[in-house]
Amino acid sequence: MKLGGILNIKREAKRPLFSLRKINRQKLKKALFYVLAGFLGLIIFLFIWNLKDIPTPARLARLHAAESTKILDRNGNLLYETGDQRRTVIDKSQIPDNIKKATVAAEDTNFYHHHGIDIRGIVRAAAINILHLKVSQGGSTITQQFVKNAVLSPKRSIGRKIKEIILSLEIEQIYSKDDILAMYLNEIPYGGNIYGVEEASKTYFGKNAKDLTLSEAATLAAIPQAPTYYSPYGTHTDDLFRRKNYVLDRMVKLGFINLADAEKAKTDPPCHGKPEFQAKRDSIKAPHFVMYVKEKLVEQYGERMVNSGGLVVTTTLDPEKQQWAEDAIHKNESKFTRYGATNAALVSTDVRTGEIVAMVGGKDFFDIAHGGNVNVADSARQPGSSFKPIVYATAFKNPRFSPSFNLFDLTTDFGGYIPHNYDGSTHGPITMRLALANSLNIPAVKTLALVSIPEALKTAQDLGITTLNQPQRYGLSLVLGGGEVKPVEMAAAFGAFGNQGEFHKATAILKIQDDRGKVLYQYKPDNNKFQAIDPQIAYEISNILDDDNARCMVFGCQNPLNFGEHHVAAKTGTTQEFHDAWTNGYTTKYAASVWVGNNDNTKMKNGADGIVVAAPIFHDYMAKLVDDSDFVRPKEIQELTVEKYSNKLPGPYSKQFVKDIFASWQVPTEKDNINVVLKVNKINNKIATDSTPPELIEEKLFTNLHNEWGDAWQRYPNWEGPVRAWAEANGILLPPNEKDDSYSTRPSISITHPANNSTISGQITITVSINSDHGVSNVTYYLNDTQIGSSSNSPYSSIFDTTKYANGTYKLTAKLSDSNGVTSENSIQINIQNGPTAKITNITVSSVTANSAVIQFQTDIACNSTIYFGTNAGALSSSVTSGLQTTNHSAALTGLTPGTKYYFKIVATNSAGGQSSYEGNFNTS
């Protein structure tokens, strides 16, 4: 019973829930019905509302008259007019199958299967556009494109889209597919003012449409998607040929052609390396600039609005400066062609606004065979060393680095990458100022390593460089131009240095008006500025790049970057193997970027560096713009003298100095602490201690010099090795960190004979006892303060003749010097007591013959005597005894040479060893 009761309760509880769900479903169905009905009603209303303005298909050709767009320079002079459509209408029978099939493959693969609109394409395009995804999705069929181009206003709106759909459905009911395709091919734009396939065929290939090859047909079919971008006379022909190949692949997939024909057509002209388009000579001024402007307009307003919407576009171009730029290139053409260059470009901006005042994208826009229509001023090329200022500007953000900071220009291995300077030389320690001014590669690579690649890229991006967007690809060669940049962006970036660090993106358009004069766009410089770098850094870079004296070391003082008294900051650049040569620079008002090279990236001849082929163009252009203005020096900038290696204030032991400018955060507050004077053992350069002999102690200057990593120098042995080698070669010593322990005991010496306080006479031998850990250099003997002997050989004794000294008490000293010059001495007292010496008298030379002579003499006391004789008074080589303990002395000298002068010396020695002497001479017969 209880269980049944529970079950009944549960059943009763379920019923209200079931009813509620049923009611909610019914309400939901009704709500959905009303929403769908309302939406359908809105669609029907919009269709009916727009039907009133829809022309009949029969009136298509009479409904919309195109109005040209005028592109003007800043003074209102006409540069180019997009109107005056050139079109040659042909019958569908004159349109070959290959252009029809190529167009269908490129624009509308379901053309023969739909009824004017592609529902899935419209929904997909609407969804993507609503979500604001950056994908180009028109969703338009060929029929819709014909209606857009032939009938409706170029202004975009929902109403126009509805009219487009309705008309497309109507046209499909009235005309055949071939008729619609023929009308489309006669109507659509093919770039510039070229409309219709026949006019495009004649213009680009010099032939009728019916004679087009498959390659040519696929090329034309590739253009309508973006006529300005893909124009054969535009700057994107490489992309045009890629799209042409895409069209051929689509034709194969759709079964229109076979694979062999497609592959052949890919290499038939026009194609990469063989453009073979007819030359264009339109009435157009500054053509590269005009095409640059037109691309910007198309990005904003679309092809049809630009080509036939009646816009009036006032650009930033200054006609006078444009002429100066063109003249500078043409004047120097012979110089750069001599080095194997076929092209040059120059773009110039106003640094205060970013306005492009001159743009020459190549020396001849109409030289299609050499890619003259390519706008190199807006093309990404490697900048060589002209990128270095951006890296040094990054370094100057760090308080450690300033223009006076010392870098070691020494061959260094950066983990397998070993850069070299342009001329292969190195310069040892050099300041950042000199390293940048002279474009030295090794210091620049070190600077990039010190600041890091991400930080340098951030600075480049802050300065408007948009092309360096593959950070994983760049290594330390980035500072030498390892990434691609556009001249137009480099001009704007360098312009920020001249504008106190304030960056203005390069802009080409001042104002856009519609066909009724309504202003659609007005350039406002204040909305286009950004403080990219600190004004103090901007001034430091400008001060370096404007320093003619600093760059004399490598470039010589008279070079194209020297503008005399005028202030122009400039930096050249050359890529490896001379593919590109650059010069970028600026004044306080204008910046310019010059490129020289070949469009196909073939290398120029050796020696085609920036200072040789690009700088002359830069000089001739900028010489027209210079004035007396100088770069603004922020009040925070200080000029100081610092110690060369530490970059700190001079200390008591500083010997070398540098004077330069410092930003406020770079100003040193500490004194030089790398130059120190220490007391060391001069033999081993170890720190002197109490046991170091005083005679070995000297004060010596040491320099605690290491690589550029500061306190982290030990972590970079590849940097430290070259620095240490250079320092040692130049006599710069590191402070010692070891204490001298070479002398635990000093050497000692003691006199062992004669004894202290003994009485001596005659000749004696002085002997000593020695204790020395460092050997013996010599022992010197002194009687009082007079040296009486020395010895350098063991046992270091010496003969002492006391008879040469008067009787009395003397101090006898023995002084030891070890192998290091450390000395020790010992002294004793001695008493000399010798008898009287003999007096020599009555000297006669007799019995002189040619070969002999006899010498006789007397002494007052009995003594021994010896006669020394010879022909050299300073070296008497012979001797004979003349007496022994006698007063009468005689000796015969034999073996003499006839007719020769002989010198003799008589020495008489008493019993105590005392001596007396007499000297004389004679001649043999």
Image: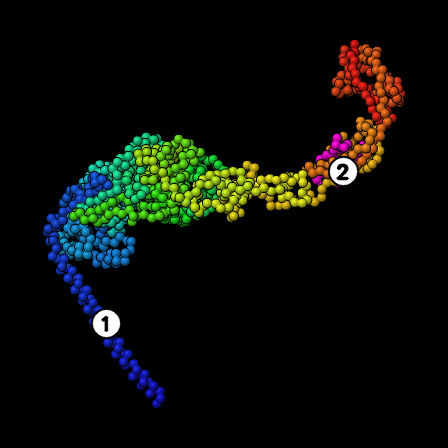
Q: Quadrant of residue 582?
A: top left
- Can residue 699 be seen here? yes
| Residue 712 part of the magenta segment | no
**Circle nearer the viewer, 2 or 1:** 2
- Residue designated by label 2: 826
- Residue designated by label 1: 28
Nearest to the observer: residue 703 or residue 483 = 703
> Residue pushed farthest bottom?
1
Q: Amino acid at mark 2?
A: Asn
Quarter of the image for the N terminus: give it.
bottom left
Q: Amino acid at mark 1?
A: Leu
Image side of residue 470 versus residue 697, left or right: left
Question: Which residue is at 25% across, 56% downward?
Answer: 129
Q: Quadrant of residue 387?
A: top left
| Residue 770 part of the magenta segment | yes
Quarter of the image for the C terminus: give it.
top right
Nearest to the observer: residue 573 or residue 837 = 837
- Can residue 482 be seen here? no
State the extent of the magenta-drawn residues as a range: 764-787
Image side of residue 800 versus residue 364, left or right: right
Question: Which residue is at 12% across, 49% downward?
Answer: 63
Q: Residue 296: x percent and y percent?
A: 26, 46
Question: Which residue is at 84% across, 35% downward?
Answer: 758
Mark 1, secondary structure of its residue: helix
Instruction: Tell me if residue 138 comes above or below residue 275 in the rendering.
Output: below
Q: Residues within 10 Å of mark 2 (few under 14, many from 20)?
A: some
Nearest to the observer: residue 253 or residue 782 = 782
Q: CA distance from mark 2 to mark 1?
A: 124 Å
Instruction: Tell me if residue 662 comes above or below residue 20 in the rendering.
Output: above
Q: Residue 510: x percent and y percent?
A: 25, 45
